[in-house]
Amino acid sequence: MGTLSGLFAPDRVAVVGATDRSGSVGRAIMRNLQSGFDGTVLPVNPGRETVFSRPALDSVSETDADLAVVVVPPDAVVPVVREAGEAGIRSAVVVTAGFGEAGSDGAARESELIEVATEHGIDLVGPNSLGIMSTPVGMNATFGPEDATPGGLSFMSQSGAFITAVLDWANEQGLGFRDVVSLGNKAVLDESDFVEAWGGDNGTEVILGYLEGISDGEAFIRAAREVTPETPVVVVKSGRTDAGAQAASSHTGTIAGSEQAYEAGLDQAGVIRADSVQELFDAARVLEGQPLPDRDTVAVVTNAGGPGVMTTDAVGDSGLSMASLTDDTLESLSASLPAEGNIYNPVDVVGDADNDRFRSAIDVVLGDDAVGSVIVLACPTAVLDYDQLARDTVDLQTEHGKPVAACLMGGARVDRAEDALSAAGIPNYFDPARAVYGLDTLAEYRSIAEREYEAPVAFDVDRERAEEMLSSAVDRDNTRLGVEAMGLLDAYGIPTPYGEVVDTPGAAADVAARIDGHVVMKVVSPDILHKSDVGGVEVGVADAEVPDTYADLVARARRYQPDATILGVQVQEMVDLDDGVETIVGMNRDPQFGPLVLFGLGGIFVETLEDTTSRVAPVSRPEAEAMTREIDAAPLLRGARGRDPVDVDATVETIQRLSQLVTDVPAILELDINPLVATPSGVAAVDVRLTIDPDRL
Amino acid sequence: MGTLSGLFAPDRVAVVGATDRSGSVGRAIMRNLQSGFDGTVLPVNPGRETVFSRPALDSVSETDADLAVVVVPPDAVVPVVREAGEAGIRSAVVVTAGFGEAGSDGAARESELIEVATEHGIDLVGPNSLGIMSTPVGMNATFGPEDATPGGLSFMSQSGAFITAVLDWANEQGLGFRDVVSLGNKAVLDESDFVEAWGGDNGTEVILGYLEGISDGEAFIRAAREVTPETPVVVVKSGRTDAGAQAASSHTGTIAGSEQAYEAGLDQAGVIRADSVQELFDAARVLEGQPLPDRDTVAVVTNAGGPGVMTTDAVGDSGLSMASLTDDTLESLSASLPAEGNIYNPVDVVGDADNDRFRSAIDVVLGDDAVGSVIVLACPTAVLDYDQLARDTVDLQTEHGKPVAACLMGGARVDRAEDALSAAGIPNYFDPARAVYGLDTLAEYRSIAEREYEAPVAFDVDRERAEEMLSSAVDRDNTRLGVEAMGLLDAYGIPTPYGEVVDTPGAAADVAARIDGHVVMKVVSPDILHKSDVGGVEVGVADAEVPDTYADLVARARRYQPDATILGVQVQEMVDLDDGVETIVGMNRDPQFGPLVLFGLGGIFVETLEDTTSRVAPVSRPEAEAMTREIDAAPLLRGARGRDPVDVDATVETIQRLSQLVTDVPAILELDINPLVATPSGVAAVDVRLTIDPDRL
């Protein structure tokens, strides 16, 4: 969608449905636009001579506008947008509600609107939007009661009401905005378009979003990956919890994807996720105001030991660590601090420290190469002037160019100091945990900005064989497959133990004879998903027992479900679990993000411990490697407690091959390899379950 | 220590070391005391005629004071306190520093001080204290720059500087205090004493603490359990993280106990733990201002869908759940809300709601028996008057008597509404997550107030046999025992599989012959702690292989450590793991809290997944039961995935029996039963390791 300059930097704005009528939305928009817009405001209303003393035009087609803001009744919206399109207007904001959010009539209206906008190539915001703002041109094209202070934050929100609340609050907090967009129903333009547009805008320092859903996960990841190396994107994605997701779906009617998918997708997009409003704006403030640290270490300089300990706790909770100060720094601090002080981090200049002692300690610590960022932490004392401390902090931050956060603790006595810090982009908090959160966010963003996205490996696989297997299963009316689908894994180069599905006791004995040692036997039936729960699995069967075991397995399955289709019994080589770890590799499809690949601790622990992690496919090698590192049980893979490490490379390759399979074959709706046994000598997919969508074959 | 009325409600306060000298601590205390104290202030300074125009006395013995505040030089402190004691003064605050925190001389001085205070029965605060305050008598006996606003919070802090920061901030926030204590070095009075005193004080609504350590865990638990049914106690215990613990120990020189012990101990004491300053005062505000909910369900009434979803997320993150509104409520809301509204929780009265519609929805929801507490959540609109909404909220809260929190979102436009809410004890936040945190804290406190502490069960055990076993091990110079100590468990009624330690291959064969089926063999050596890491364990040994296996195990151990003392080999019945779960039951001793009993997922998962939970011993039956419920793997014990549930009662009993063992026998420093195999038919302690302190036998 490009820069969207027609939306944010128009010369001429038509307000279709403009009016003077008291209490109306059309009046509110006119009032807001009139008050500061650098360009021309053109009211359109065939029923009026003038609006706000300006001559009212009869039709949008007479305006020669760049942007049309539409506030006519629902039925009139589509004709107006069509007219605008025909008149060459390429940007529109539809404020009117009564579309997708309002039953089937509304949904039909929204489809028409999309069609017309697409036909004329209109960049359309809404419908059901509060409007948009752009402070560089003084434009407030919303019907809200608040104006924005100019600044570097561009903010999009799926809730218009939230925008009004944020603006009122932000004005008091000294936060300034560049562009503000109420996304409304996102019929045409959505979050991906604004991420792209603001990423290309030099005046936008930080992109912020309140989102209840992402319309197109793939497009969003693509857009955000382009932008995040230069411009941080911070998002509150609500509906995180089950309760929240339910509330979101009743609010906007969106079918929310899974939280797992959002977690993976936002992370893979390079987006910083805030869990609350406070986090969103704490992150925004520090990302706008402070440089990035060159390392993840933080030093605390304080005149109060207790708050120093609290701050250290907050660092311990974060992704940062306490810097180990260099010998030079320790020597220098040792020379300038009294004996009761602490030269180690957190550096304690002691309660009787005056501004000079405090300043010199901050200076020394900021100059230490081992220190990534600094927190200046102070309690009020008789000998310390907060205003001076604030000025010193600002000067030293500028001089050293490292990120600094402040906790000048107190109430009224901090007000002026806080203003001075804030003017220099240094946030000040009463609670040290918030200062640490801010610096942690800077470090997180640095690692995002430095990311290199690697293309997924394309393994040499037998895609045709895989597709044929699925087609032939569907031809037999099988859409839920089990061990009989092991060949599918084989076609994609995922190691499976030798085994065959047979349908007589004699054939079972023949297969067993070809296998060294004992075998595993499993009943094969599309109707029995949890085989072990019904006694459908026997482990460690000796050759001689194979025919009887065959009969037993089939009999048990029949008892459990008399009408089950039984395809036979799988006879499989036994995988030695002694040195192995049972893992799971799986996939399900998310409505917004598509195939989501999962890896974790398998076997009986899957549901109970939920020690798993996910990525949106296609999964690159570094991503697959990260997955094997980030589960809690990761040390088990790498040889905890004197065990030999398992073949992690083979595990990583299996994740990638599965990713390739589910990307190649959209007909696979869900797939679980559980367990994938990882041993020191390789991996083996011991069992598999999948569901097929015949319509996507 | 009782009520400590001599400290908090004295008639006559002597300031020993009082002076007019500018910049001195003695002057600051005089100034603060003079400014509002209801009683008499008596300066003591033999070198001055007057202090602040009052006649100065030569000695504390001439004052007839109830309370002596001591600010003389370090060396003069002990003589002054002795003199005060001899003169019958029973309360003292020692402000002077240079004691336990200042090297060995200081430590010696502190010992003397304790001795003198104990001899005379003096309730002594400090040394190294900022002082104390008590607003009911207008007493500020600190040298800090701030005074406290009267209110219901009593606050103790191990950091004096933090008190000055908090008071300045709290005055702005409208938080009021009753008593404030800077604990200093806690030489005599510590946190337990103030919890006890404030628990008996009707004017204290909430007890707050900033603590870096707890001096005596057992005393603290005892004191807090008495108090918390009536008065909530909220504590920030810093040094939570490894980094923080290190910082705390360099700050106060305390040997901090383990975070695990504090977590368990504070919880068992009924203390609410805040992780940050913000949480501490958010909890204080709501506990002081609002009633307790009768259930853990919350309803949200809002005029904005988006923030409603965010709030629901925060509820999902908390211990609360979203209330399911009753049919009557739904009907009533349905009649009064427009079609675009949402009658289900979160209740959306829609952006065009005026005050009447909002008020009536809050009223209906507060009247619903299924609703425990309510959040009033609003974004600014043209038709909503925030001041009126605040007044309505206050009225309805009073009328229904249920807890309410408010998020009237915005900046300057909320100021007056916030004051009105605050005056009625209703907190207002911009961030809904903080409102939810407050209500969650109320629910947490209700469950604490309702707790019944059950006495631990005293099982019939063979304590004498256990002690004899340990003594005889110590006699043989063994202080680290392994499987050879299984008899210890047996003496305390903890089931162990049949097994014996033998020292010849022939004896091993004899034991194996007495056991049905295969056996487990383990080398027994006090020098080899991780037997399986050195090939010192063989599982599933057939009778015929026993003698050779004996030789192999001993040979491997010799190879690993040629000089190891090898006591022999244990031959043990095999425990069938198929239907079992490997758990761990263990104990270590904490310097502050004493024996800490641990339960969790055992086997190879112990270190990796750290899925464990702890309690300070003695552990009661309900506490042991709770332990088996609160680990992540708990569903495995109760039969996840079609498995039979294990014998949880036997597991619970084992935890209690271990608790009894380590309480009875303080010589056991550490003990691990790993694994304790829990099966459907019972439990079996398969392996044990323990360390003995010979001096405590």
Image: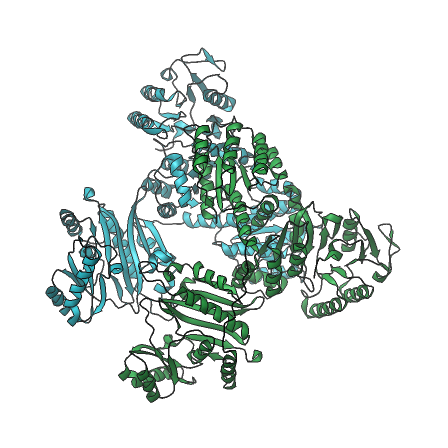
Chain colours: A green, B cyan
- Between A34 and A665, which is closer to the camera in this rendering? A665
Above or below — where is B497 with respect to B426?
below
Indicate the quadrant where residue B646 lies: bottom left
Q: Where residue A217 sits: x, y (%)?
A: 59, 64
Inspect this view and state whether residue B237 appears.
Answer: yes
Q: Where residue B396 sits: x, y (%)?
A: 59, 48
Is residue A689 toward the left or the right of residue B601 in the image?
A: right
Is residue A342 toward the left or the right of residue A198 in the image?
A: left
Which quarter of the rendering shows the N terminus of chain B? Answer: top left
Q: Where residue B552 sits: x, y (%)?
A: 18, 64
- Between A349 and A416, which is closer to the camera in this rendering? A349
Which quarter of the rendering shows the C terminus of chain B? Answer: top left
Q: Report the number of discs.
A: 0
Indicate the quadrant where residue B551 lies: bottom left
Find the residue positioned furthest to the top: B49
Q: Where residue B25 sits: x, y (%)?
A: 46, 22
Inspect this view and state whether residue B403 appears.
Answer: no
Is residue A228 toward the left or the right of residue B212 in the image?
A: right
- Between B438 and B579, which is closer to the camera in this rendering? B579
Is residue A426 toward the left or the right of residue A611 in the image?
A: right
